[in-house]
Amino acid sequence: MSHKVLVVGNFFPSVMDDLKGKFDVLHATDKDALAAMSDDDIADIEAMATFGWAPADVMDRMPKLKLVSSFGVGYDGVAAEHGAGKGIICTHTPNVLNDDVANVAISLMLMTTRRLVEHDRYLRAGKWLSEGNAPLTTSVRGKQVGIVGLGRIGEAIAEKLSVFNCKTVYHSRNDKGVAYEYYPSLLQMARDSDVLIVITPGGPETDKLISREVMEALGPTGTLINVARGTVVDEAEMISALQDGRLGNAGLDVFEEEPKVPQALIDMDHVVLTPHVASATQETRQDMSDMVVENIVTFFDSGKPTAPVPESAHLVQA
Ligand code: NAP
Ligand code: 8YV
């Protein structure tokens, strides 16, 4: 008898095709559709594919669940520790998105410091003709860029920054022993840096890590780039610091209550906003989709899914 797999959300057709070719697949188009399914409907589910979402109560509804294959590298919406306590392995899709996410981080840094989006609006509004040349902006050449979270994506950002003639430094809980200068103190790094690029995981450990103090240390000429999770930055404090000029400007791909974005941010010209698109290319999303399938297939084949999250690593068969 083939294994029963639940797919929650609308994945690429290839995911459905690949899984249907190998398993007995049940599809819930979204969380509400899953909530509407009876416990009997999902009693035999052994693996679940989701978009970064698997709370404890959902895992608890499936007594035979052994695997959660989550789309995305960040899994702050997956109760991985709770799952591990019940022998459920959680997997994610690391590395395949490093390049594209790093590209968006760098793009946001340039769009923000060079005010490129604002200048696009300036031209379209006819101001080049009516008011003359757009205002001068700020170069990153010779400036210090501090990466908050030098992991897989942080490293890719640092590599790409090497061609911009700026100084790259970083903060994380551990010294990575790499060539970039390590700051054990985030506050000190913010004081010394012109740009902060935030790329840590989300979740309680990093909640509001970028606090009012950090933003004030970055200061009136500083640029804050967030491609991590909205929760990592104190959004209310960021808005007020941007409004008062205590923080220079910001480039943001992620927000506290996505897809809701505070009107105050939308109203500000010195802020560049993108709708959580850092990994959103056809190529990378296909690679991430393939990895969601691969994690399920390798789990059922060998008990060793390709990319377990650290909380599940001890459950993977040696
Ligand atoms: P990773 O390899 O696990 O790197 C995360 C880094 O953050 C590590 O170097 C870690 O170092 C550091 N870190 C963790 N907690 C910290 C804390 N409390 N204070 C300071 N540093 C901390 O993860 P990744 O693959 O690079 O992905 C990072 C995150 O990017 C994901 O979890 C996700 O939230 C986000 N992301 C966003 C998008 C998007 O579309 N915008 C796309 C992909 C990923 P230490 O353990 O030494 O602290
Ligand atoms: C995805 C992400 O867009 O990988 C992550 O952590 O934030 C993005 O790549 C997101 O997970 C979509 O569900």
Image: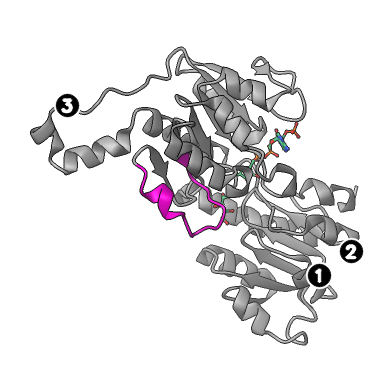
Q: Earlier in the sequence, mark 3 or mark 1?
A: 1
Q: Main secondary structure of the magenta part?
A: loop
Q: Secondary structure at mark 3?
A: loop
Q: Secondary structure at mark 1?
A: loop
Question: Taking 58 as reference, is 187 left or right?
Answer: left
Q: Amino acid at mark 3?
A: Asn
From where the camera sits, is residue 147 visible?
yes
| Label 2 sits on residue | 86
Question: Taking 139 as reference, is 200 left or right?
Answer: right
* Image position, residue 308 (x, y; %): 77, 50
Q: Where 180 sits versus 237, above or below?
A: above
Determine crowd level at label 1: few under 14, some 14-19, many 20+ residues with C-alpha closer than 10 A. Answer: many
Q: Amino acid at mark 2?
A: Lys
Do the residues bearing badges 2 and 1 touch, measured as CB atoms within 8 Å? yes
Q: Earlier in the sequence, mark 3 or mark 2?
A: 2
| Label 3 sits on residue | 133
Q: Residue at x 52, y 41 (%)?
A: 238
Q: Does the stretch in magenta take in 255?
A: yes
Q: Amino acid at mark 1?
A: Leu
| Label 1 sits on residue | 65
Q: Which residues are magenta?
A: 251-268
